Image (cartoon, rainbow, N blue to C red):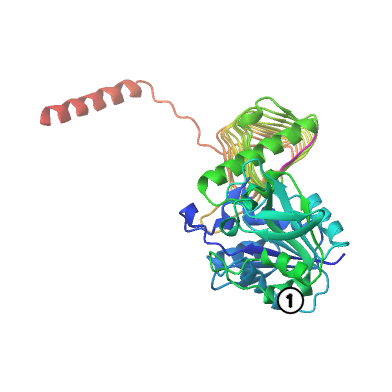
Amino acid sequence: MKTALIILAAGKGTRMNSDLPKVLHPIAGEPMLIHALEAGALLEPERSVVVAGHGADMVRDATLAYDMAIKVVEQSEQLGTAHAVAQARDALSGFDGTALVLYGDTPFIRPETLEAMQTALSANDVVVLGFESADPARYGRLVMDGQQLDRIVEYKDASDDERTITLCNSGVVACNSDLLFDLIDAVDNNNASEEYYLTDIVGLARARGLSATAVTCDEWETMGINSRSELARAEAEFQSRARAALLEDGVTLTSPETVFLARDTVIGRDTLVEPNVVFGPGVTVESGATIRAFSHLEGCHVSRGSVIGPYARLRPGAELAEHVRIGNFVEVKNAQIAEGAKVNHLSYIGDATIGAAANIGAGTITCNYDGVMKHQTQIGAGAFIGSNTMLVAPVSVGAGAMTGSGSVITSDVEPEALALARAPQVEKPGMARKMFEMLKAKKAKQQRGS
């Protein structure tokens, strides 16, 4: 079935009290708009259109960073949801298939739910996504006539009897693209808000003798986000479900409520995650790894059997092979670390390649930045880097080589060589006593002067 997505993302989000467009506020490390796009992307749409309004340039930048093929159109005046969908007409010119209308501030719609709507559309002209609510509050109501959806009534326009209905409107609609725009052309703004409601297309379709129905989902999928408190609740909901899924998949979380995950976090079975670990976007952890407490990972890959932390930071571009050990207060950025290598203590490894079974001593730093450009450090297999070594890139240390503790390495080191780059120790007998006497006398003189 050919599908096009129309994602409405034009709202200002006044209740957010923010300069950032509402749909760009993050959940699980990514804008809620990206969550909505990702759910629709799993349907392999032929076209996708984002309708932007407030902060359109920022919305456009975020959308195109996700997928350059997505069209972004602008709704210069916010005159209602039907008016917003109408802005996608030109971008879908010539398209003959199903149009799915989604919302950038409703990030949790599951692909399975959208597939169910596609299936229902094979026997109906219009399909609306609804949900049963124990507290319908101010949601629009779905007025059913058996299996047919008769109309959608907004809360402001609903009668007392209609407000007792608990089947509520999510706003998500599936319809043939040409029919959708034809119905929108007939929508007016004769209502309490004087807006062009997308929901009116159901009544218009039924008046033409066309069929409409509702597909239902769990209420949490339709969670809309309009304020900071709702954003916090959405984050909590996402984290709770993501943690539960990991536990079900065989990952051990010793304190689940303290672990925070990104939308795309992947963790293999039999991995142990200790308390207070944060996963940013772009993290894959293979089976059987251990992520110890208070570590922070983003944009990295951790292979089977590796141990990370405690208090470690893996930044984007960190690629760890099997059985690598990254210890406490170690930071790794844009570096490839081969099987069995160890970076155990108080080190920074950036823009580097570390060979298999190499040992990086405490306090080692790859000095990768000269103030303008980044440079590479290469350390061969089995090399031993002494504690407090400064590796001034670009530089390489050969396989099986060794550096002495406290060395500043500015030239390449041959394989199996020992490199020492530090000033010789000088000892001056009695000088410490003389220095202390001199300094104490100076301090006493300053105190008398004050």
Image position, residue 241 (x, y; %): 70, 37
Q: Quadrant of the C terminus?
A: top left
**Image point (78%, 66%), residue name:** 175
Image position, residue 321 (x, y; %): 77, 39
Determine which quarter of the picture holds residue 10.
bottom right
In the rendered structure, which segment of residues is drawn in magenta? 265-269
Q: Which residue is mark 1?
A: 182
- What is the residue that sits farthest to the left in this orientation? 449
**Magenta segment, principal secondary structure?**
loop
Asked if residue 307 lies in the magenta stretch, the reply is no
Judge the density around disc 1: few (<14), some (14-19), many (≥20) Cα neighbours within 10 Å: some
Determine which quarter of the picture holds residue 155.
bottom right
Image position, residue 20 (x, y; %): 51, 58
Q: Is residue 324 visible?
A: no
* Residue 333 to residue 342: above or below: below
**Image point (71%, 75%), residue name:** 91
